[in-house]
């Protein structure tokens, strides 16, 4: 009969007290909820945003629950600017003392589909992946330097796994951007690659893949069409992702790396 004396409880496994999470795109629709989930689990959160959204990031940081001795911070990050990426990691460490968890959630949008996207705009969309890589590499170095443990959670998309339904968009809006599909598929592939290389450094790399979670300003007619394509017949609510995010951030997933957790109401199941 196995003894439970050395076995962590479920509360201990999911507890993020004493941990620091750096979250990019922190003012985003889903990302605000990611920040709340991490804070509710006990983490200190460093809310990173592009400079023009700094004020909104500040509001998010101020609104986060504080558990125990946690403290929340704001910093700037632009994936399009490699200097900003180095500065972001250095500033997060300077403010919070260390970083244990990195959530790569922000991205610059592309506003053209396959019919009209320029080569330049396509390449710029893929530069988000370069930014995710550079920030992740800086994080890995920080974990190695302090002989710590780290968890990277890269936010994917159902559109990194499957194509979209043309009839969900036709006549209402442009198709889901081909460059975005390429970005999210690439982030998934990169995460698996880095997971294997960095496992010996104490850094886990996983992907959290949301299905459809339209923001409140999305055309309701399109949302209705998307609902009809979903096995659950509903769109995701931001909080639907919190549990999986905290799982990947915490010791509850200490034996999980290179994985992709799909939270999509069954979208990719049929
Ligand atoms: N909302 C959905 O339906 C959905 C579905 C699948 C996947 N996702 C993914 O979830 C994540 C969050 O989505 P969201 O709906 O909250 O998006 P959002 O657009 O609301 O938030 C993204 C944030 O990224 C920031 N950003 C813009 N340019 C940036 C740059 N150059 N560098 C760093 N950050 C930049 C923005 O300021 C914004 O606050 C994204 O990675 C997205 O691809 C969202």
Image (cartoon, rainbow, N blue to C red):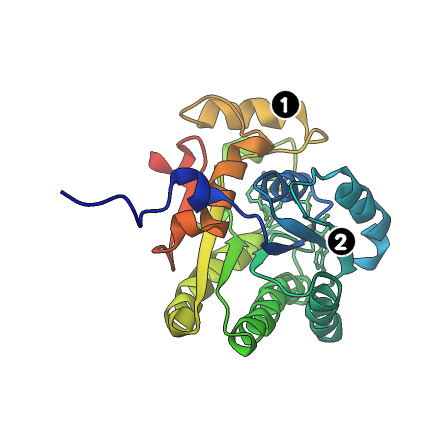
Residue at 50%, 74% in the rendered image: 147
Q: How far apart are marks 2 and 1 (CA)?
A: 38 Å
Pointer 1: residues within 10 angstroms few (<14), some, or many (20+)? few
Q: Check the image and report above or below for 141 versus 185.
A: below
Quarter in which the C terminus is drawn: top left
> N-terminal of the two: label 2 or label 1?
2
Q: Can residue 170 be seen in this view?
A: no
Occupied quadrant, residue 200:
bottom left
| Picture coordinates of residue 252, whole percent (x, y) | 40, 47
| Residue annotated with mark 2 | 73
Quarter in which the N terminus is drawn: top left
| Residue annotated with mark 1 | 221
Pointer 2: residues within 10 angstroms few (<14), some, or many (20+)? some
In front: mark 2 or mark 1? 2
Q: Check the image and report above or below for 47 versus 164.
A: below
150 or 240, which lies in front?
A: 150
| Picture coordinates of residue 268, whole percent (x, y) | 39, 38
In the picture as drawn, the residue positioned furthest to the left comes out as: 1
Occupied quadrant, residue 107:
bottom right
């Amino acid at each position: 009969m196995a003894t439970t004396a050395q076995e962590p409880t479920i509360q201990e496994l999911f507890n993020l007290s004493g941990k620091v999470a750096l979250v990019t795109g922190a003012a985003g629709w889903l990302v605000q909820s990611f920040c709340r989930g991490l804070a509710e689990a006990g983490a200190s959160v460093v809310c990173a945003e592009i400079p023009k959204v700094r004020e909104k990031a500040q509001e998010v940081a101020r609104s986060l629950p504080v558990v125990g001795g946690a403290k929340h911070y704001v910093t700037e990050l632009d994936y399009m600017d490699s200097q900003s990426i180095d500065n972001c990691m250095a500033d997060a460490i300077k403010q919070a003392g260390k970083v244990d968890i990195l959530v790569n959630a922000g991205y610059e949008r592309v506003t053209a589909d396959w019919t009209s996207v320029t080569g330049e705009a396509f390449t710029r969309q893929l530069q988000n992946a370069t930014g995710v890589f550079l920030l992740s590499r800086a994080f890995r170095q920080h974990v190695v330097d302090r002989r710590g443990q780290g968890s990277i959670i890269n936010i994917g998309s159902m559109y990194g796994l499957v194509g979209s339904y043309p009839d969900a968009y036709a006549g209402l809006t442009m198709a889901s951007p081909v460059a975005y599909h390429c970005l999210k598929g690439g982030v998934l592939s990169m995460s698996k690659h880095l997971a294997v290389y960095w496992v010996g450094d104490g850094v886990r790399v996983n992907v959290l893949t949301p299905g459809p979670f339209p923001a409140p300003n999305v055309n309701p007619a399109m949302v209705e069409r998307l609902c009809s394509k979903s096995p659950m017949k509903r769109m995701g609510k931001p909080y639907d992702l919190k549990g999986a995010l905290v799982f990947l951030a915490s010791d509850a997933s200490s034996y999980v790396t290179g994985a992709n957790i799909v939270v999509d109401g069954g979208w990719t199941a049929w």
